Amino acid sequence: MTDHGADLLIRADVVHTLVPGQAPQRALAVRGDRIMAVSADPHGLDHLVTERTEVHDLPGATVLPAFDDTHTHLVFAALGAQDVPVHRARTIPEFLDLIRQRAAVTPEGEWIRTTTNWQELNLAERRMPTAAELDTATDRHPVLVKRGGHNDVVNHYALRLAGLTEDTPVPPGGTIGRGADGRLDGRLIDNALHLVEHLVPAPDRARRIEGLRLASRDYAATGIGTVRDCAVTPEDHAVLRAARDAGALHTRVRTLISALGLTGAAQVEDLLDVMEEWRDTSDPWLSVWGVKFGLDGGLEAGATEQPYACDHSFSGMLVWEPDALVEAVEAVVRRGWRVGTHAYGDRAVRTLLDVYARVLARNPGLPAGTLVMEHGGLAGPEQRARAVALGIPVTIQQPLLHDTAEVEEVFWGPERVARLFPARGWIDLGARVSAGSDFPVGQFGAMRSVWGMTTRQTVIGVKGPEHAISYDEAVALHTTQAAHLTGESHLRGTLTPGRWADFTVWDRDPANASGEELRDLMPTHTVIGGSVVTP
């Protein structure tokens, strides 16, 4: 035996390294936080075993690299870990009762928040609650009901605190909802969210760290080892750093600092000043990837070329003027940061590509992958070809489509919904494409996403089967391609000596699972940096 042996040795039925052309291996050794060696012989690494080596003989198991979720919202998940769990409700009375129960144990005047991962069409009434209905749950607390990242409903107590009335000007790129009687109904969309949300006190630091502990463990339990959180405020990033220092992160985190709600380059410059101290990327657990912009709305306000199916006078909205966005993006790239921009509808995709083309022309020599399109939901063949020609990577989120297909058909109609997230078209063009969930709009999970991309299954059946991809392609979008997006291919994505020991262990080979078995498959272990983080 040698003093230079392994800390951990896995013998498995198969180790998929994801190295092109390499046959499946049978053993994997780890020392410290790195992969030490792999072998096609299950006993080929036995010479690395010492008295301190932890050995796992797993004759029926499959080992894969840990997965990335390249567009998600861990911070939202962490906040929701202790919020009112309205995603469990199936009717509006149940929804209201959950809020009522929380109000009964919450001091009067304190804010009550809900989880964000729910859809109104999953409620029997197939709509959102109103301010008046929220008042019946409590009129002694301000209530913030969030659905995803683009929609809020608040009660009248919250409207009064914010000073909102029927005469309040609607901010550009936002919506202040009204009922049939013209009175405020509590609904706020996109750039109107801040009118109320700025009043909501942040949870205390200890509560937020515990939320991150719980939420990151939930991600890791599904096989996700790295999350790219796409809307992190400076305050959120400070909490993430505190969680990192406390050992509370169970996944690696790559943050996009949020420029959502900003309206000009001067404001962006102020944000960049705050970000200067975060340039160090040496921490393997937490680093800043870049800056996040939003160009159009979400499900109800994505900017489309053709009018909505439900309202032929409406085609969504752009929340930036293109000239202003060019200046804002330039401010970021000239400071050496990367940019990810939300563009969901086809008009937004076209506009974003125009903006990015101008930025590239005015800033020659930008490193590849500096400008990224987040979602690219309705990108058609011409737009996809243009993105590839410009070298613009794209992140797609099949779980978002799965969970929201019925909602989206109301707004866009079935034909457009079937065209969302055309993974097949992107891959066939050689695009730099990677995959995620967009939680809380879509449900996170390594194999849930793979299953969705291979089947195109949604809550209302298969949509756009011609856009389905193979299992191997779907896995690559969460591993090798995801590591490329974050600029970490030399550290993650494949199971090769010298790379971080980030891998998942499954009690069967997911490649041989099908249907709901693949959708619900969870790893028995997720290992990050050589340490078992789940179970």
Image (cartoon, helix red, strand yellow):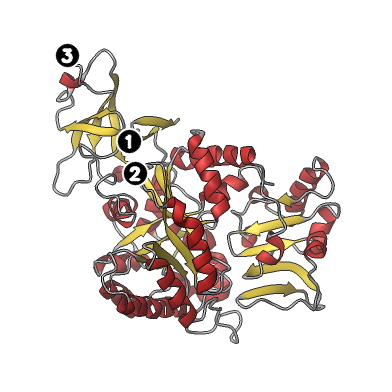
Q: Earlier in the sequence, mark 2 or mark 3?
A: 3
The location of residue 35, given as percent across then percent down, is: 25, 34
- Mark 2 Cα-neighbour bin, 10 Å: few <14, some 14–19, many ≥20: few
Q: Nearer the viewer, residue 475 or 451?
A: 475
- Mark 1 Cα-neighbour bin, 10 Å: few <14, some 14–19, many ≥20: some
Kindly identify the residue that appears in the image at 29 percent across and 50 percent down. 488
| Residue matched to label 2 | 513
Q: Nearer the viewer, residue 374 or 147?
A: 374
Q: Nearer the viewer, residue 252 or 69?
A: 252
| Residue matched to label 1 | 508
Q: Are marks 1 and 3 in contact (CB under 8 Å)?
A: no
Q: Earlier in the sequence, mark 1 or mark 3?
A: 3
Find numbered disc 3 in the image and state the secondary structure of the residue it sits on: loop
Front of the two marks 2 and 3: 3
Q: Are marks 2 and 1 in contact (CB under 8 Å)?
A: yes
In the picture, which quadrant includes the C terminus? top left
The location of residue 222, given as percent across then percent down, is: 44, 41
| Cα–Cα span, label 1 and label 3 | 32 Å
Amino acid type of the residue that numbered disc 1 sits on in the rendered structure = Arg
Q: Is residue 27 left or right of residue 284?
A: left
Front of the two marks 1 and 3: 3
| Residue matched to label 3 | 1
**The label number, if any, that marks residue 372 in the structure image:** none
Amino acid type of the residue that numbered disc 3 sits on in the rendered structure = Met
The location of residue 360, given as percent across then percent down, is: 32, 75
Tell me, yes or no, if residue 123 can be seen here: no
Amino acid type of the residue that numbered disc 2 sits on in the rendered structure = Ala
In the picture, which quadrant includes the N terminus? top left
Q: Most extreme residue toward the bottom, as rendered?
A: 313
Find numbered disc 2 in the image and state the secondary structure of the residue it sits on: loop
Q: Is residue 260 above or below residue 206?
A: below
